[in-house]
Image (cartoon, helix red, strand yellow):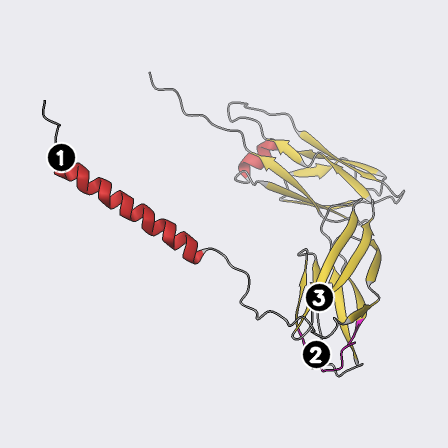
Amino acid sequence: MERPVRPVAFTLIALLAAATGAAWLTWGIERAPRPMDIEPLPADRPPAPAIEPAVVDMGELVPGQPVSRTVTIVNRADVPITVVSAQASCGCTTPTWPRDPIPPGGRAEAQVTVEVGDSQGERLSKQVMFLVDVTAPAELAVIGTVGNFVSCAPRTLDAPADDVAAPAPSEVVLESLDGTAFRVDEVDPPIGAPASKDRLARHVVAVDWSAWRAADRPMHLAIATDHPKAPVFGVVLKRAIVRAPTQP
């Protein structure tokens, strides 16, 4: 019995696929992310600079209000050093660094600024790495506490389906956690309003879904208060999922 002969087109396609796969594999190996091309430091490199203080306590942080602290970089080496950059472990932390060389035994100042978002009641723990040209990096720890000032719940609302002709409003409750009475200043977009315009320890904002539809169904709602330490609260408005009818 004779062996069946594969069509020529099939054979060519198989060879092309194998070659393409090998090429992609080679490309992946050659283009894979690599560490920065930095020459390794010698084993007897000078000591890394010291950071004074080694731990910076930002204290109580208020959402939306940046706090800055100054630290000192001390060159402990017997040669000049240059800080080439500073990298933070979080986008909420922004460091600066001295641009001029620091002589042996010399000192230079750097600054670290932290600005937190609307998350409250959290313990902040970040790191800043100062990269130096001839020594190992110097690391700084940044700590702090984000206070609890006003709660906002829920932070997500499900919009009614389009077949609900007159949907009932949904409520977002804001409540003072530090005892400070406050007023709701703005609801943006204006598709809801607080029950009272007075300064109270608790507010209920009613979201009007008919107004939401008329405003082209925005996906986010911002609620601003006059509380001196509360952030602008964001509420996600989730649109109802519309499923296509099943084909017979």
Of 206 and 28, nearer the camera is 28
Q: Which residue is mark 1?
A: 7
Q: How far apart in space, not on screen, are marks 3 and 1 (Cα)?
A: 65 Å
Local packing at callout 3 (Cα closer than 10 Å; few below 14, some 14-19, many 20+) is some
Q: Give the residue displayed 76% in from the left and 72% down from the top.
A: 49
Q: Which residue is mark 3?
A: 95
Q: Residue 14's x, y, as percent?
A: 23, 40
Q: Is residue 74 magenta?
A: yes
Q: State the quadrant of the C terminus.
A: top left
Under mark 1, the amino acid is Pro
Say whether residue 28 is left or right of residue 94. left
Q: From the viewer's perspective, is 162 left or right of 113?
A: left
Q: Which residue is mark 2?
A: 81
Q: Hey, which residue is sitting farthest left in the picture?
A: 2
Q: Please, what secondary structure does the residue beneath circle 3 have? A: strand
- Sequence-wise, the earlier of marks 2 and 3 is 2
Q: Could you say where residue 215 lies in the image, as x and y percent from the top left? A: 55, 40
